[in-house]
Image (cartoon, helix red, strand yellow):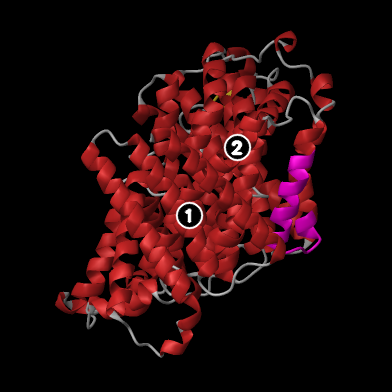
Amino acid sequence: MTNIMKKTMTALSVVFVAFHLYTAAFGTMPGISQKSIHLGLLLVIFFLGAMIDSKSKLEKAFMGLMLLFSAGGIIYITVLDESLQARSGIIYPSDIVFGLLLIIAIFEACRRKMGNPLVIITLVFVAYAFLGRYIPGFLNHPGMPLKKFVNLIYLTTSGIWGSPLYASASYVVLFVLLGAIMSVSGIGDYFTTLATSAFGSFRGGPAKVAVVASGLFGSISGSPTANVVGTGTFTIPLMKKNGFEPEYAAAVEATASTGGAIMPPIMGSTAFIMAEMLGVSYATVAAAAVIPAVLYFLSVLFAVDIYSAKNGLKGVPRDQLPKMKDLIKEIYLLAPLAFLIVVMCMGLTVIRAGLYTVIFTLIIVEVNPKTRLSKEQWLNIPVATVKSAISVGVACAMAGIISGVIMGSGLGFRISSILVSVAGHSMLLLLVLTMVVSLIMGMGVPTTAAYLVLAALVAPTMTKLGIPDLAAHMFIFYFGCVSSITPPVAMAAYAGAGLAECDPNKAGYKAFRLAICAFIMPYMFVYNPVLLMQGGLVETLLCIITALMGAYMLACGFEGYAFQWKLKFIERPILIAAALMLIVPGALTDLIGLAVLVGEFLSGKMFNRVENTLAA
């Protein structure tokens, strides 16, 4: 029986991938059908797998029941799709029954796949939908009868079948498939090997390898925790062997893996959903993310380099590293990413770009005997695709339920009003409040889900105070991402600590310090959209140069080490303050920051401080 179920899962996974390739090539299905089939296949495959993994007959029976709930709710709405427009709002008892069955199945899938946090958050919103009349104050609303709730969540595109699930069903899945192809074929391993060869011999080389390799692979995987486990298995032991403290090794891996989600061109799939929410092209979102992403990773590299210099950590001997000349022969394995950027710049739709990149990648994979896929690997690709797509699809469905409640109850307007009232029309205070909410929401919740909820709740308020739409959504997205390395619930750092066999809390705080630039950058691009490619060429270049100087000084200040000498206690806060002035765009602040930087350098040379420095 178990073998039959496993074969059924594999067959359905193949059908899932074939369905999305077909609709990408010949056009997505109209109405709800594309989204319902997408979600239905994911839920059925997931609950089949849950039945296989069940440890008792009772649990197996319950998972089978959830599978039937999923299938029933999906089949009903898919068959009903074309007649929904002609109903004029009439709701039948069967609508309520099948709607509730599907909603229950989605909640259970979320609980088993992603844990309790998102389930609890969504349940709070559902309770608010029904009990709003009993809540005093500004949150009071007439309440939703069951019929209205099911109609909004199940029968319209304001709930489960909203824009988040549309993005997942139409083009996010193509990039999940692309990531699966790269992972199964070994192209992802090539990224790590190339980074090892290029950076391994430099000071603190293994940590720099972790930053580059995890950044590249993290952009594809979209999950900081999964990326830590994937690349950290190689990089963390290498860092420890090279003399890095276990907590620091875990922190470097976690910080780099988290940054992958903000690194174009793929940005862990959330960028595609952001483009859909904003009604702009994906190329616009990707271009806006370039400068902040580069500054993020360079700031981490600066911190690693300074830490290595301070502690006398050298690189790996060149003769122990992969030969670059051998890797150059396979440089075409980077072609898929280059191809994706080119077709995006040519103006192709995201769906077409994703489809063509998948086809191109499969051709590239088959050219090299090392990456050529066996029969088992061909079957592993759809299985790996579904495994990753389940998290995105279920999160989008849950976010749709929350969005439906927000829209149907008027909560969005109420939240906007209270935030504006509390902030007192102060943009800075609103940004701080939004940051805190984003970090709390992102703790234990996937970045995609956290972003979707906050985009519906908080982004409208930000735009009311004059913050551009793109900057508002990027602000929320950034803090949703870095919540993975924000204590006390730093999930990516905890995963790294498990591999490094060290204290997870210490790893979390070190990761927080390494990524300090990521906590400053969103404020900078809100106040000056030049960092989002919203300015002239000269202005943008000057902004990048001064921001890089600021990122370097920030790392020096936090490490207590600069220009080959140890900083005195009073110098550290001065350097940090000057770093912030350089990161903040503006002629006066830049001049003050540069003056401090030059002054620190000249004072060190004048007093010959290098000779008094110990590598400690």
Residue nearer the viewer, 184 or 268: 184
Give the number of marks: 2
Residue nearer the viewer, 551 or 375: 375
| In the depicted structure, whether residue 141 falls above or below residue 382 | below
The answer to which image quadrant residue 604 occupies is top right
Write down the residue under mark 2: 379
Please tell me whether residue 357 belongs to the stretch shown in magenta: yes
- What residue is shown at x 81% (from left), y 61% (from top)? 346
Of pointers 1 and 2, the one earlier in the residue sequence:
1
For residue 535, the mark is: none
Write down the residue under mark 1: 41
The answer to which image quadrant residue 216 occupies is top right
Q: Which range is magenta? A: 343-363
Tell me the distance, in whole angstroms, between the alpha carbons under discs 1 and 2.
17 Å
Q: Is mark 1 on a helix, strand or loop?
A: helix
* Chief SS of the magenta region: helix
- Amino acid type for the residue under numbered disc 2: Leu
**Is the residue under label 2 in contact with that under label 1 (CB below 8 Å)?**
no
- What residue is shown at x 54% (from left), y 30% (from top)? 230
Left or right: where 401 falls relative to 192: left
- What residue is shown at x 59% (from left), y 55% (from top)? 172
